[in-house]
Image: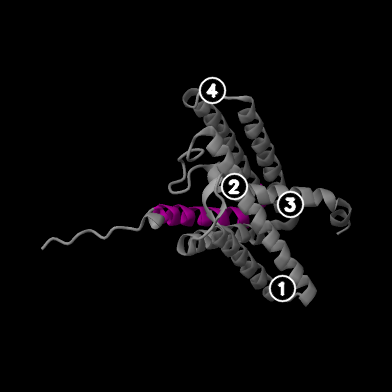
Amino acid sequence: MTERPVKTPRNWRDLGPRVASAAVMIVVGILVIVSGHKAFEALLSIAAIIGVWEFYNMARFKSHQGGGLITEDFYALGAYFVLFVIGLAGLWGLSLLAGPAGLFFVVSIVVATDSMGYFVGRTVGGKKFWPSVSPKKTWSGVIGGWFGAALIAMTAVLIVRLDLFESLMIVFFAVLLSFASQLGDIAQSSVKRRMGIKDSSNIIPGHGGVLDRFDALLAVGAVLFFLRLVTWSMWGAS
């Protein structure tokens, strides 16, 4: 009797490539972060170059396959490119000012948000968060991402032993960054939908391109950049 192959549920078919690619990126990321600001700066430069290439590819695809670029397409690409540049600047500043500890904290929040959102959203399902822009993202996944970010923050405050008020502020800040990361993912999804593509490129198996994988981190970098501007005098005094 021939056994039938076990079919992987549709929701989990991309899990293997995602996990393998994520493991490689985690190792590379850790090595770069612990190597210091110059190494992280070099990584950002590489990401910037690939990201610009992906912007060009998205515009070229829409121009050749999607009936040509219209004014709204240029606005969407331009707005997201501004976010891309500001996000890179924010991450560069985070590395310079906060060092490896700050980078690990912020990256951990983004990773926890993405991972918890993925597993909770695929497992629980439910009402869509913004179906017209990101059909797969659910409210359960969004809230699961917040919970993951809060766990990272609570772990951090236990390690450094902050008081209750400071701990609550750190947890709130982590959830704020978590939501920013989710909005970054939605912004990228919106641009891709307008360009008529699934992924900005296919250089990262299971994840797409640099803009697909690091859209959330870029949005967090942009938030940190503007927070730096708002609190410039306070940060400078410290």
The residue tagged 1 is: 160
The residue tagged 3 is: 224
Q: Is residue 187 visible?
A: yes
Q: Is residue 34 magenta?
A: yes
| Identity of the residue drawn at 89% across and 57% down | 237
Q: CA distance from mark 1 to mark 3?
A: 21 Å
Neighbourhood count class around disc 3 (C-alpha, 10 Å): few under 14, some 14–19, many 20 upward: many
What kind of element bears circle 2? Answer: helix
Characterize the magenta stretch by its predominant secondary structure.
helix
What kind of element bears circle 1? Answer: helix
Q: CA distance from mark 4 to mark 2?
A: 23 Å
Which callout, 2 or 1, points to the residue nearer the camera?
2
Disc 3 or 2, which lies upstream in sequence? 2
What kind of element bears circle 4? Answer: loop
User: On the image, which quarter does residue 70 sit in?
Assistant: top right
Q: Position of residue 169 (x, y in %)?
A: 76, 67
Span highlighted in magenta in the image: 14-38
Disc 4 or 1, which lies upstream in sequence? 4
Q: Is residue 163 visible?
A: no
| Amino acid identity at mark 3 | Leu
